[in-house]
Image (tube, helix red, strand yellow):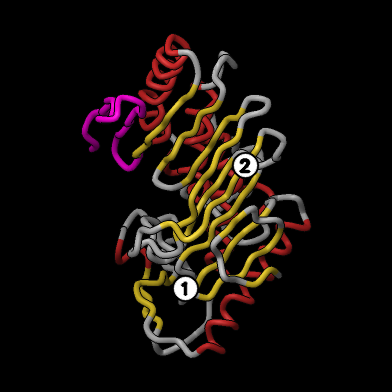
Amino acid sequence: MFDGAQVCMLPDGKRLHLCEGPIDIILEAFGPPSEITAAYKRAEVCFLDILSTLVGELSDLRKQIGDPECYPVGPVARRMFNACWPHRKCFVTPMAAVAGSVADEVLTSLSASKCLSKAYINNGGDIAFYLAKGESLTAGIVGDYHLPQINATCAFTSDSPVRGIATSGWKGRSFSLGIADTVSVLAENAAKADVAATLIANAVDVDHPSVSRVCARELDPDSDLENRAVTTGVGKLEPEVVEEALNQGVKTAKIMLASGLIHAAVLILNNKYKMVGDMPAGLLAGEKQ
């Protein structure tokens, strides 16, 4: 059982913190004070129902996506299903898009009045954002979960098609089948970015003695990954091995890019970077593929 939802303003008086169970959101809105107050209230009301509604459908959301007739009921669950459906030819469950879908849902409520100039929802690193005409937003990319420093910045303007950013990797809070330190994806919304980052990170992989893996169910009996081996450690890798692993991920990212499922991705392993698509980023000493 989860503790009850927590809702509070952060000490800066500008950002709102929403937390319940595994959901941990920091959001901020910009605009007239009265509109910000109203927006934060809408976000709170939306947030309070999210986890309980998701839990009601959790058993189905942990199953490999398949029959479109088994369509979820809840709004977040439907976002999860819709984001994962284009990837159904590979193994994927709607849970691959849960964090991004939550961010998208809260953003929809937050920005409903359209009187804000901009807003963002950061759900554990998966980010959904809103930009009114003429507005811009800068986001940071962290290359290593264990070294939380910004390695790059992405500047978005209102005419950009990107409204979602997500990051995945074996060091993150979710299990990964691959060895990427991080894969960050830009997409139309956070849900699409979330599932894409998960699958590209899974693809960054090689068999190597320095890579340790454990059955997902040994770490979490309820894991949607069931008996698949998830990465628990990555030791020293030769440069050619790093290159091989990243190239596997690049192949997957390019397919998604060509299909219009993502706008860009940056893949990072052992301080080696590869970029796919038009990543509006600086400070990355990487290769564009």
- Specify whether residue 156 is in view: yes
Residue 236 higher or lower than 18, as above or below: below
In the depicted view, which residue is nearer to us: 208 or 230? Answer: 208
Q: Furthest residue to the top?
A: 34
- Tag 1: Cα neighbours inside 10 Å, few (<14), some, or many (≥20)? many
Q: Amino acid at mark 2?
A: Phe
- Specify whether residue 88 is in view: no
Q: Which residue is mark 1?
A: 179
User: Is residue 49 toward the left or the right of residue 157 in the image?
Assistant: left
Placement of the C terminus among the 4 image quadrants = bottom right
Residue 2 sits inside the magenta stretch: yes
User: Is residue 182 toward the left or the right of residue 9 in the image?
Assistant: right
Residue 244 falls in image quadrant:
bottom right
Q: Which residue is mark 2?
A: 156
Determine the residue positioned at 35% across, 26% down: 14
- Give how far across and how far down residue 168 sits, in percent: 48, 58
- Dot 2 or dot 1: first in sequence order is 2
In the depicted view, which residue is nearer to us: 152 or 39? Answer: 152
Disc 2 to disc 1, C-alpha distance: 29 Å
Residue 277 higher or lower than 133, as above or below: below
Q: Amino acid at mark 1?
A: Ile
- Give how far across and how far down residue 216 sits, in percent: 37, 65
Residue 141 sits inside the magenta stretch: no
- Give how far across and how far down residue 243 sits, in percent: 58, 82
- Give how far across and how far down residue 253 sits, in percent: 66, 63
Placement of the N terminus among the 4 image quadrants = top left
Per the image, label 2 sits on a secondary structure element best described as strand
- Please state the extent of the stretch shown in magenta in the rendering: 1-23
